Image (cartoon, rainbow, N blue to C red):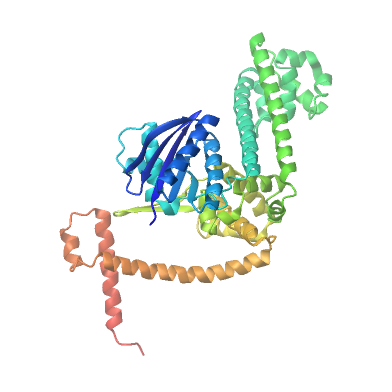
Amino acid sequence: MENNAFLGVDVAKGSADFLLVNARKETLEEGFMLDDCAEGRKVLCRLIEKWFASGITHLYCAVESTGGYENNWFTLLCSLSASYDQKNKTLRVARVNPRPVKACGKAGMLRTQTDQTSALAIASYLIGFPENVRYSPHTGQSDDPVWLAARGQAGLIRMLIKQKTQLSSQLEKLLYTRLGETMIYCRNGIPGWLLRLVSRYPSREHLQRAGAGKLAKIKGLSPDKAKSLLGKLNGDQPATPVIACHTIKATARGILHLQKQIDTQQTFLIDQFSEHPDVRLLESITGIAVTSAVRLIVEIEDVSRFDSSKAFCAYFGVHPTWRESGDGHWKTGMSKQGRAQVRGMLYMSSLTAIRWDPDLKKLYHRFRKENRMNHYQAMGVLMHKLLRIIYGVLKNQTPYDRQVDRENRRQSKEKQQAYQKKIAQNKAVQKTTRQRFMSNRADSTEDAPISRRAWKKRKQEASQSSLVEEYAGSPPAD
């Protein structure tokens, strides 16, 4: 007879809270806290051994994702899972998303939020939604350390880009105040030559004293552009304070330093995965170069962990959403609930694809004209299409082929038509089933205190059904 137990682990910096319950959410081990050190991990191993000795046959554990603090506990439990598999005992470990765990706690009417109640919410989520929990592989191996390190490297690059963006915004405001004449060159961001220029000559006085000859020595600044810039300078402006000059110079140098760091880290990441077979496959897709291919592979890791292309698109938040309640319905478009950095890469890749891929270009213009979508809505369709292509290429381990894609779209169109027909039939059956106790729909429509929108909708449905019945009972035409 199976005796299942569920261990919720709420991780904090330097420690973690544990709570063990059974399938009826009855406490088997009172909540306790362990430090994230060698001694604390040894204590947890002894406790797990004691729980199995007490008669527990299956132990399901979950740690909440906390940005990396949970990795030590997760790795430990995965290693224990491998050892207990050899002893014919079951120990499974999962890393769960904090959002559904929080919702599960609210559904359980947890009025206070402590470390112990959070551990209880994690265990309750394992009990209530087992179909949504993805446990570590049965081999007991934790996340591949190579992919984990690669995601850390990608996170470092994102952080550097964010810092560069913040400094660029600050420098743009400084230049707007002190060197407003240079803003005509910043319509598409601050160019590199301007950064190098103000890092050496941060004010009008410095620029005028340097002259066109010295300014032309700046990389990216031609003699003609240097003369044009000096001609635009207004000498009637007050002198720039020394503090402002220092701030402009330091900010520009900081941006140049960050850009150098970004290029170095991106080059290192690309060199590590440029020869990966999946990267080579993604490069066969129009619009995806080696940089985007590496970043996508780092985020995807192994495509086999996704059961379908729908799950793959939903993981990155590209799938459409639809809401309906009462007499109102809302089409909200793209969900945007997945990883934003992947959607950013897909957007830029789609921009390139509609220039060089005739099929995607045709798809873009079809949705713009026939479906009357704006640019961003049509780009959302292309991002969804591009992500499905990526899934097919990686799943089948074959390079992208337009002829194969066209044949798949032809077959998909036939399947979609049959699917839409089935959906319409199911909706009709569901509607009839839902309204089976409303014998006289017309009378109830007149008497029910429904909204104006629902009243119009029912009247329209009643008229359509009467027309169908009238034509269904008429004799066939000659």
Q: Quadrant of the N terminus?
A: bottom left
- Reply above or below: 253 against 297: above
Residue 284's spot in the image, x, y percent?
71, 56
**Which of the 4 image quarters holds residue 219?**
top right
Residue displayed at 50% across by 58% down: 371
For the point 61% across and 28% down, the residue is 163
Residue 293 in the image: state x and y as whole percent: 68, 48
- Along the line of sight, which residue is nearer the eye, 224 or 215? 215
Q: Nearer the viewer, residue 42 or 99?
A: 42
What's the residue at 46%, 68% (across, down)? 419
Q: On the picture, is 190 further left or further right than 140?
A: right
Q: Position of residue 323 (x, y in %)?
A: 38, 52
Relative to residue 59, is residue 441 depicted above or below?
below
Q: Which quarter of the figure has residue 233?
A: top right
- The C terminus: image quadrant: bottom left
Q: Quadrant of residue 145?
A: top right
From the viewer's perspective, is 141 left or right of 291?
Answer: left
Does residue 131 appear anywhere in the picture?
yes
Q: x and y percent of residue 182 in the render?
A: 68, 24
- Total count of labels: 0
Report the side of 2 relative to 262 (left or right).
Answer: left
